[in-house]
Structure formats: structure tokens, C-alpha cells
Image (cartoon, rainbow, N blue to C red):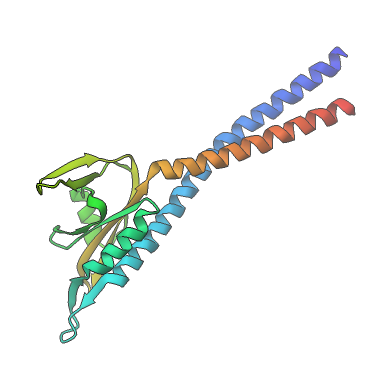
Amino acid sequence: MRLMYRQMLGFVAVILSLMAILTVSFISVTDQTIYQSTWRQLTKYSDSLVWDSIRYNPKTNDFAGFENSALSSNARLLSRQDVHFAIYNAAKKELYASNGFTPKLTASDWKHLKNGDIVKKKADYPAFRRVNVEGKESYKTSSEMTLIIHPYFYKQKLVAIVTIGTFVSTIRQNVKQLLKNFVFAFLLALLVALVISYMT
């Protein structure tokens, strides 16, 4: 009997070690995968709101800005999914900020954007601007967010920068749920393996 228990203990130790390795690998891969998926989705949202609201001069066919009503409509839809965005022009002037979303763009960000690169950030603490009844502005730092900063060109000229992001807590909730499901399945498999090993 002692030999059987020692064998079972060794078997459990191997299973637990394997579980620990797989869990760490799973968390790492899943975390990166979910962030990549989120960035892809944010890019689609960014493209959609730009194409919905961009306006051109009918005579010269030049870029003529954005239509605020279209931006406001998109802002309402996206805010229901905890997605917020801000639009800047090439002169770094803010053109629109959904729900007062005012992320800061660094000199390094602008350098990449002018080269046509999309900037991705995992952890930023952008502010949300609030305007009170008297018309005074105040700023409140938000929770951690992940965001992309997307440059848009027209006739090879930078015309707009879209910063769009969502809360990191939303992503972490998805990771936690996947991890719970993974651990539950692994423990169930461990229990079944122990029962089978005991019976044979």
C-alpha cells in the first residue's frame, strides 16, 4: 500500500508541476492574445468613425474636417462598450473628445505618427475632462486603459490622429474568466486521472 501511495504522490506532484507550467504559459499567451485582439478591434472602430465622419470640399476634393454629429453618434455607441476616443489634427490641436477623453501624446508618439506608424500602449492613465454648470473645466484621471493612436493621411498629408482606448479592467476580466475555466478543467482532469490510477 505504501508503494501505491508513493506512486500516487509522485503522480500528483508531476501533474501539479505540469499544471503550474501550463497555467503560467496560458496566462502569458492569453494575455498577449487578448491585447492583440483588443488592438485590432480598436483599429476597426477608429477606421469606422473616421470614414463615417470625414468630410471633403466638393470643389477642391481636399480634406475639410469632421462632422461633429457623426462623431457624437459614434461616441454614444462606443461608450456603451467602454470605448472612448479623441481626434487631433496635424497641428496637435484637439478636434473632438468623446466623454471628455483627453489622452496625452508624447513627442515620441508624434514622431511615430508622422512616419505613419500606429502606436499601441498597454497602460496609460488618460484624463477625462469635465465641464461644470459654470463652464469651468476639471480633469479626472481614469482607470488604466489600453489604447491605439492611429494616424490618417489624405493625399500623402497627415490630416488627423485618432486616439481610441478601452479600460484594462475589461480585458483583465476576460482573462480571469478564461483562467477560471482553464483551472476548473485541469482540476477535473486531475481528479479523473487520480480515480483511474487508484482503480488500476
Q: Considering depth in this image, is 131 or 164 the residue closer to the camera?
A: 131
Q: Position of residue 72 (x, y in %)?
A: 27, 63
Q: Answer whether residue 121 is visible to the viewer in this image.
A: no
Q: Residue at x 57, y 38 (%)?
A: 179
Q: Is residue 97 above or below residue 198?
A: below
Q: Is residue 21 left or right of residue 35?
A: right
Please identify the quadrant where the C terminus is shown: top right
Quadrant in the rendering for residue 23: top right
Identity of the residue furthest to the top in this view: 2
Q: Position of residue 126 (x, y in %)?
A: 25, 44
Quadrant in the rendering for residue 66: bottom left
Q: Residue at x 34, y 66 (%)?
A: 47
Q: Residue at x 70, y 27 (%)?
A: 14
Q: Is residue 37 above or below residue 28?
A: below
Please identify the quadrant where the N terminus is shown: top right
Q: Position of residue 163 (x, y in %)?
A: 27, 55
Q: Answer whether residue 59 is visible to the viewer in this image.
A: yes
